[in-house]
Image (spheres, coloured by chain):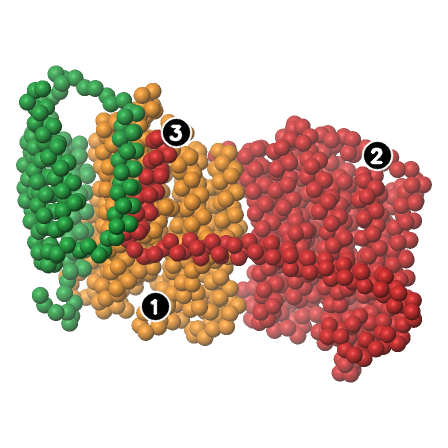
Amino acid sequence: MSASLLILIPLLPLIGFLINGIGFRRVPKGAVGVIGSLAALGSFAVSVAVLSAFKAAGSEPQVVSLFDWITVGNLNIPFSFQIDQLSLLMLMIVTGVGSLIHIYSIGYMKHDEGFGKFFAFLNLFLFFMLLLVMGSNYVIMFIGWEGVGLCSYLLIGFWNTNTNYNNAARKAFIMNRIGDLGFLLGIFTIIATFGSVEYTEVFSQATGLSIGDPVVVTITLLLFVGAMGKSAQIPLFTWLPDAMAGPTPVSALIHAATMVTAGIYMVIRSNVLYSLAPFTLEVISIVGIATVLLAASIGLLQNDIKKVLAYSTVSQLGYMFVALGVMAYSASMFHVITHAFFKALLFLGAGSVIHAMSDEQDIRSMGGLRKKLPITFLTFLIGTIAIAGIPPFAGFFSKDEILAHAYEHNKLLWALGVLGSLMTSFYMFRLLFLTFFGQFRGTHEQEHHLHESPAAMTIPLVILAIFSAVGGFMGVPEALGGTHQLAEFMSPLYEGARQVNPEAFAATTLSHSEEFMLMGISVAAALIAAIAAYVMYVSRNSVPAPDTAERSSLERLVYNKYYVDELYNGVFVKPIAGLSNLLYSFGEFFIDLIVLGTGRLVKGVSGQLRQTQTGSVGYYIFAMVVGIVAILFWNLLIR
Amino acid sequence: MNPTLSIFYFLSFLTVLSALMVVFSRSPIHSVLYLILTFFCLTGHYILLNAQFLAAVNIIVYAGAIMVLFLFVIMFLNMKKEDEEAKTNLTKIAAMIVAGTLFVILFGAYRKSIIGAYNPYEYNSQVGMVESLGAVLFRDYLLPFELASVLFLIAMTGAVMLGRREVGERHF
Amino acid sequence: MYPIILLSVLGIVVLFLGFMKSKNILLPATLLFLALALGSNFIDWNQGPLLYFYGMFSVTNLTLAFNAIVLISAFLIVAMTRGFQDDEEAQPAEYYGIMLFSLVGAIMIIGYEHLIIFFVGIEILSVAMYILTGSDKRNLRSNEASLKYFLMGAFATGIMLFGIALLYGATGAFSLTGIRGFVSTAAGAQSYILYAGLLLLLIGMLFKVSAAPFHFWTPDVYDGAPSIFTTFMSTIVKTAGFAAIFRLLSHSFAGIYDFWYITLAVITVLTLFVGNVVAVYQDSFKRMMAYSSISHAGYLLIALTALTAQTERSILFYSMAYSVATISAFGVLMLIAKEKSLDGRPNESYDAFNGLAKQNPLLAFVLTVSMLSLAGIPLTAGFWGKFFVFSSAADRGLIWMLVVAVLMSAVGIYYYFRVVIASYMKEGNTGKIRVAPFYQIVLVAATVITILFGLAPGFFEQLL
């Protein structure tokens, strides 16, 4: 595999960025989208070529060194790319889904005046994301990590005339920075411990350590803090829903399919270290499951189409961390892949709906769109089924695998996971029904304007829908008579981890009948939730009350419902609504209070310290002398 | 007690006393006069140490030129009256405490350390003379000696620059 | 060695050029002289460690590299003065002369081998700064700053001299090698007079680089001084000062590392804390830069506290990155402050930057890159500066210090980004600012250096 071929993968988006970025306002509008998309497609094509060459060469991982980058004392950091199963999988997702979203954006952003700027940023994002997944050491990963954060900041605040959007962008940036600090500290601890940042070197040294070594626990915890920030886990998750302020293709690419999975990529990449730190794994699975439940329950009552999807993303990311926590690395990656398909699909579908509705995002004003937007409806339906975990669509296989591993590890974890999956199914079908079924509830003008999106937008939808439907077959469990191709493909990645912690990778102890039972339960949960949603939102035609509860809708609610409904409302909906609202306020206010409160604390201390700058020389010199006396006193008399 | 030692103690006593008086006297002019006395005592120390050249320079430059300049400036600025309101009792007490602590610390450090002894019979009595001083200054210390002139040049340039009369400023 | 002689002579030449009728020759002449000095600096390149003037002054490739940073920074700063054309009161010949002389002091303290050279050097540098701070004679703030700086500087000099005297008393030597010889003996490692001398000398030096709690002069002085000289102070004095402290600690006192590192570590953390936290509250960009310079002193102190084999290179790289970014930041500030001046005084608040990017994309870009570099965002030179410094701390196992430093650098992002946000996202009525071509070249050069060393920091190593 030649280096020149590899370097093309990140280079093409960079060239696209440079052309569109420098030539912004000069490149004709028609060419901008073509250049941007070609850059993404080109690197996808090269990635495919690299993948086939990799398979042909016997699937041997290799490090391709481009040049010597930095040498500081005995620490040598080359600029090199590592090509193995993990980076190839990530490459396929990033460039593949990325290309589709680029094409989609041509249609979606057509009327925006910042069209060129948008594509430039999108290409820049791809460049950094590719650096992140291809780098062969933690420093390159960190550079990509920071770079994607910066791009996400730029793209969230893309419509920067709106102050709220700017605040969302800043929130995302600050929260990400908190995570990044953990990551950076982790890297320095790695340097101090192993004297290298190269993956191969670090992991081969790590195999010599014993399980539960405090240094490894520290490193893994610090790295996990980084992952929490980037992958929106408790307590650093509130930025992701706010990030929906950005254009929808950005939400699909950055805040659903690729960037937010960087944290999972990093943990899988460091699987040797994590396998050595059972304590960290416990923390990860607890944080993961808590995020699943919190985000899913908040998603139950959101009325903004993108917010629902955002909370759903947070909750799905939680599943991936649960899988990591139980050392089911392949299952986690599997979910990353399928999630990339169906969540990108759902976001793009939502974008298509928003496009048709003239930028309306409130599902209470939608309804009955299935006739007007047939392709969008069909693809969205597939995405919904996939995420809800109903076989044979993609989400079923990956989520089921995670739940099976969780069951093996801890029954409670599994039960909570199933609860989360129940909620997932409910809020997704609720979204689907409210948007596409029933009567249209928007204004007359909007109704008049309704139209199916152009081909540039629907083609990516169809392609993603196909993958969401069949993508799961790359990992059919043995119980269903298939072979888990993905797990087999990824198996060489865990050589080191298997060496240090063999029992974690032992074959499953679950019997086939047990596995069937687990599948049955989760499918049943998903179906029940879907039916409940159908009953509520299609049969009974109920619409969530508007924020300023109008008299008429309240009356309708009372008149049209039976006593059962009220009972149902009182016993089931209200407590859940209360809980959901409570959790929502917990999430939004309490956590923001902690995170932003730190900011206020700094400002407060700063204000106090500023008072010391009085301007009087006598006082300054007095303070200096006190400092001198303290230093001398301690050094000369005390010690 | 041999006469050199008794002179040393007398001079030291006088030096410390006059230095204290510089700080304690209320009138700036008295302070300057005490400072001149301090310099004279230090000159005495130089002579005791067999450094006649330094002793002469100290008298001419410090006690002579610089102190006259000080006096001139003080009289010029009409600072005869003591300026009490600038310093409150609190600052005085705080300064006393800090200075006292500093003294105690340094004294403590001095007590803890071992001071190397020297043999008076091996001591070269000519070391402080003009001849050997000149030899050291113009050979070993040539570079800092010459570069000190850059320092003075900067100070001069700066003084001229800052002191130059601006258009429209009044004459003295 | 050669630049010292050359600059001393050429400084006098510049003073004499001031007598000529035409003031236009001063700027090109000064730039030419700086270029000459820079060229002469490399005569000793790769000649191995050399000692000049009976072991007074030493030259190695690394001290030459420090000299080069100082001289290049001075070149960029002088190029931004534009001959002080805008100011009728200015006396360019004196300014340029003093700047050249002050560089003599800076180079002396970079390569001193003897404490006398160090002392004379730091006095040359300091006296020059006192004068330049007060050079805006009509401005009361400038006068006040100058006086404050002078009073406090004189006090610090006294402390430093006391320290040197105690060191001589304890060791009987002024030269770094002589002191090291004494420190390596059993008695030397236990001598309290030596300890007291070291601490006092160190305190004096830390004052000059504005480490807490000796930083109080910095905000007032940086704020009061004319911006161009603030730039000079915050880059050249800092670079030379850190080279000097490093020299003292590594050449003479590495043997008693266990004695001084705790003190230095506490000062480091305090400096980082004060610099970063107080910077958050500032409304004036210039004052923020003053606190930022305190915080960068803190990062450089981390490298000193760690004192590994890599420390000198880390300090070198960091100073380079910091100087270049600071110069371009102040360059943009000066343009804007003048454009937005209120009642004839430059406007240095954050608000002056509002809406900068609309009409002046180049200035906004230069400013953004320099802020990113100061904040330590990857792919800028500032990131690698921090990276090298932090990794040397990790090497020493000073993890707790690293945690503080990393947290504080997060605080730094906040105040550095404020001005970026102001220039890109806020509404303002900044018109097109005309930038002189030469000025533009300086800004672009500084930005290119920042990005170049951000992309390939290894390139810098290869230069050495």
Chain coloured red: A
2 or 3: mark nearer the eye: 3
Residue B130 lies, with reference to residue C203, above or below; the image says above
- Amino acid type of disc 1? Pro
Taking B58 as reference, is A70 left or right?
right
Q: Secondary structure at mark 2?
A: loop
Chain coloured orange: C
3 or 1: mark nearer the eye: 3
The image quadrant where one finds the C terminus of chain C is: top left
Where is residue C307? Give x, y as percent. 42, 35
Q: Which residue is mark 1?
A: C346
Q: Are marks 1 and 2 in contact (CB under 8 Å)?
A: no
Q: Secondary structure at mark 1?
A: loop
Query: Farthest residue toward the front?
Result: B89
Label at residue A507: 2
Q: What colour do you see for chain B? A: green
Label at residue A639: 3
- Amino acid type of disc 3? Arg
* Rendered residue at 81%/43% (across/down): A412
Label 2 to label 3: alpha-carbon separation: 60 Å
Dividing the picture into quadrants, the one containing residue B101 is top left
Q: Which sits earlier in the primary sequence, circle 2 or circle 3? A: 2
